[in-house]
Amino acid sequence: MSSTTPSSTTRSALVIGGGIGGPVAALALHRAGIEATVYEAYAGTADGVGGGLGLAPNGLAALDVIGLGDLVRAIGTPTTAIVLQSGNGKRLGEFGSPPGVESARFVWRADLYRALLDEAARRGVRTVHGKRLVAARETPGGVTAHFADGTTAEADVLIGADGIRSTVRALIDPDAPRPHYGGLFSFGAPVKDTGLPSTGGMMYMAFGKRAFLGYQVHDDSSGVWFVNLPHPEPMTVAEAAETGAEEWLRVLAAAFTGDRVPAAELLRRTDPADLLIAGPMENMPRVPAWSRGRMVLIGDAAHAASSSSGQGASLAVESAVQLARCLRDLPHEEAFAATRSCAGPASSGSSRRPTAPTATRPRARSGGCCGICCCRW
């Protein structure tokens, strides 16, 4: 593994955001020979926080580049295909990975978070908590991050991996768009014993009359489900939690009354203590500016994907790895431009991306996808 080349002037980076994209970016930068530190706004870790997510083949391939693929495969469950159903049980369609491409993996966000945090520590990548970014000042030779606690940190570049409500995005462009409520609130849970037959590695997604259900049942009868429930007004997770898990399970069950889907059984067998309130679903308009000076965005801060695409985490991983490769090979201005070019037109438009079989195809890596930086390690 080669370190930075003479064409690169980047030796250090501040990574803002300690969720999924941030640690991956720091690990990729570390592999590229660039010293990176992750700064997370919250004082504590995010253990036990969040629901489930899918890692598509393109995301797994990007993780393989930096030696993280098998780490994630070990904590994930293969999802061989997605089956679409109507609320009356009619099969509408099925799609999965193309022939010769591995299956996607379902993984709990908390498990993925912990695995990445532990691996970052093992590889010597530092994560600092309680550092809420409030400002950034550029100098001729670098950028200084100012945090709410009065401390500062300096590096050659600053990377915003701070999600859909990105502070870095607003620093890059004060007029940048913000997310808006999509009219749905999301819930989910693991179920130790669903009492249902295995779905054979497939995840079913059913469009009920009043709500949307996704579920997968494993061979041992354990499983997972998630529900998108229409709700007229946005709520915070804390506000939703005030209703109580048992009441939410009742509300969710009522939403599927009359539908020919296994929602009632899944919800009946869900331990209220296991209910995950994932929060409001939000749409993110196109972000015109991904970088300015020595600051750049990756992941949801730049190109938030629709939850229905199953590509949010995978695209965040891809952009993190590609940015690290470009910063290894190019001056930061060119690296930022090349990273956006590599993202392609799909990442430059609305966050509402359709779910389609081609969305899971890995992108070609050999020879350099942008024709500028060398896409080999």
Image (cartoon, helix red, strand yellow):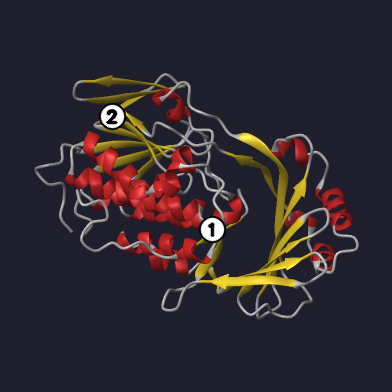
Coordinates of residue 50 in the picture (x, y in percent): 61, 49
Name the image quarter holding the C terminus: bottom left
Q: Which of pointers 1 and 2 indicates the residue nearer the eye?
A: 2
For the question of whether residue 284 can be seen, the reply is yes
Pick the front one: 205 or 144: 205
Secondary structure found at label 1? helix
Within 10 Å of disc 1 (Cα), the crowding (few <14, some 14-19, many 20+) is some
Q: Quadrant of residue 282?
A: top right
Amino acid identity at mark 1: Asp
Residue that extends furthest to the left in the rendered view of this protein: 6
Left or right of 96 in this view: 66? left
Pick the front one: 306 or 61: 306
Mark 1 highlights which residue? 111
Question: Is the residue 20 above or below the residue 256 in the image?
Answer: above
Coordinates of residue 32 in the picture (x, y in percent): 23, 50
Residue at 48%, 26% in the rendered image: 176
Amino acid identity at mark 2: Arg
Q: CA distance from mark 1 to mark 2?
A: 32 Å
Coordinates of residue 297 in the picture (x, y in percent): 39, 37
Mark 2 highlights which residue? 294
Secondary structure found at label 2? loop
Q: Total of numbered circles in the picture?
A: 2
Residue at 54%, 36% in the rendered image: 285
Within 10 Å of disc 2 (Cα), the crowding (few <14, some 14-19, many 20+) is many
Residue at 51%, 55% in the rendered image: 311
Q: Could you tell which of marks 1 and 2 lies nearer the N-terminus? A: 1
Q: Quadrant of residue 85?
A: bottom right
